[in-house]
Image (spheres, grey):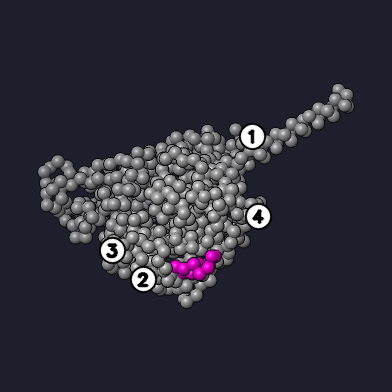
Amino acid sequence: MSFTRTLRALLVAAVAFNTAAAAIAAEPKVLRYALPAAETGFDPAQLSDLYSRIVTAHIFEAPLAYDHLARPYKLRPSTAAAMPEVSDDFRSFTFHIKPGIHFADDPAFKGKPRELTAQDYVYSVKRIYDPKLKSPAQPSLEDEGIVGLRELRDAALKGQAFDYDREVEGLKALDRYTLRVKLRESRPRHLYGWASDVMGAVAREVVEAYGDKIMEHPVGTGPFRLTEWRRSSRMVLERNPRFREVFYDAQPNADDADGQALLQRFKGRRLPMVDRVELAVIEESQPRWLAFLSGEQDLLERLPNEFVDQAVPGGTLAPNLAKRGMQMFRVPGADVTLTVFNMEDPLVGGYTPEKVALRRAMVLGTDIAREIQLVRRGQAIAAQSMMPPLTSGYRSELRTEMGEFDLPRAKALLDLYGYVDRDGDGWREQPDGKPLVLEMKTQSDQASRQLDELWKKNMDALGLRAVLQTAQWPENLKAARVGRFMLWRVGSSAGSPDGQGSLERGYGPSVGKGNLARFTLPAFDKVYEQLNALPDGPERQALFDQATKLLVAYAPYRVHVHRILTDLAYPWVVGYRRAPFWLDWWQYVDIDPSQRPAVR
């Protein structure tokens, strides 16, 4: 071959290579993964389920956020220009909102850019207090005691229209960009709430334009916007063209080698780094696992328990997955799983000794060690209280009745209070001789079926007849919120570093919202309210312990486990790191398209 022909061939190859590289670079970066349960909607004020909130956390923005790499946590400004000014012994907080932040474009704005203002946060917080919305966030926000909001809500509860234009002393826009919050009492941890996705700003024009359909029309200032939605099936979010200039920055711990490496790699990159996020809803664990293995999904959050031995035997990534360049992320979850007893149910509810005895016998007769071994494949530790790991109030050395399995004692407790088999059919009746049939609401996915089978065996061993009522998770949530259930099994993830959020599940004013058990006990409410004002320390820990004793004694919940979470990702997913408390992370992840063909 002549020199000229060789040179021409090299030039053609170089052009082809550069063209291919340019095509790869121009290819939209898409992150694809699946949720294990369906969403319920996209209005921050009306949500309580994790999977809807994962979506809204990337659409709506609160004034504060968590540093993505700092551990265990560190607050930082988000839409606020700086951390707020705190005064009057944690009773007064002043936020300065950054000028120039805009909502995503929407017909509600009639073709004009819509800037975020302090008044948007005033309006958004007031919505949480509107009785018409029945916001699950209202009781916990009321605990913070923002001056004037309770009175505004009370007026609406008496039949008046909720007055969004009525000035509230504790929640004021002092000017276009300055928000002042005043509390009735000292709240040392108040700022955690202002980093929650629940406090994301919504625009009044959007709410008024869509009315009762607002759950279907999320419009925020965040890095992504919803562009496609097939209910309970598929959601697509794309980069928000109106999203301001935000660059990757964080403060990982000095001894956090992984965090320091991520900071070095991405510092200064404009966010978000991906163009599009495609979410599938795949409730059954096997199809979800197979979709990941086939490359249809880039990431698998929460490896299903039944595939632990296959994917991460002994806690180590399986060789066949390692050869494909898979990444494993394994961390303790800041969560707790629960069986909820409806305290208003005529069979399992109530506060009389025989009702308490029934619930405590069911607690003692539930074999948590077997659940961890057989169902969860060792990916959990037994829970002793409502407080999740990584939160205040949690004590790893604590031991309570919730961690015990004592079948003889459980049976003796049932016998003592008159739950005996009167007709010889092998099943116990109620103390008054009426039939006793436990009804557990559940879902149809494989993980739920495995837990159902174990629970049924536990109840059979106690001589308690039990039946299962299967429905989709959102339907079960709706039923639980209004008290139409006897028993239900749920998981609860911490939304902040403060363990008091988990205790809201027993707080009387939160009945029908966070308090799914509908538990009302003045002694518990008093302890819960005392926790609000105290700084973290021994005195506050003693109150956490006191609250735990009351929940163990009355047993409105049976705590099960704290899960160990294992996530898997293909090598083209770069920068992933599971967040302990916060839900927004898509903007910090990059996709390397050049890696896809090499692995596939």
Amino acid type, residue under disc 4 in the picture: Lys
Q: Judge depth for marks 1 and 2 and give the one in front.
A: 2
Sequence-wise, the earlier of marks 3 and 4 is: 3
User: In the rendering, which numbered label is found on residue 530?
Assistant: 2
- What secondary structure predominates along the stretch shown in magenta? strand
Q: Secondary structure at mark 3?
A: loop
Q: Residue at x 25, y 45 (%)?
A: 439
Q: Is residue 599 above or below residue 417?
A: above
Q: Secondary structure at mark 4?
A: loop
In the image, which residues are magenta? Answer: 171-181
Q: Judge depth for marks 3 and 2 and give the one in front.
A: 3
Point out residue 502 in the picture as x, y percentages from the top left corner: 38, 59
Sequence-wise, the earlier of marks 3 and 2 is: 3
Amino acid type, residue under disc 3 in the picture: Lys
Point out residue 316 in the picture as x, y percentages from the top left corner: 53, 44
User: In the rendering, which numbered label is found on residue 267?
Assistant: 4
Give the alpha-carbon distance from disc 3 to disc 2, as whole Å: 29 Å
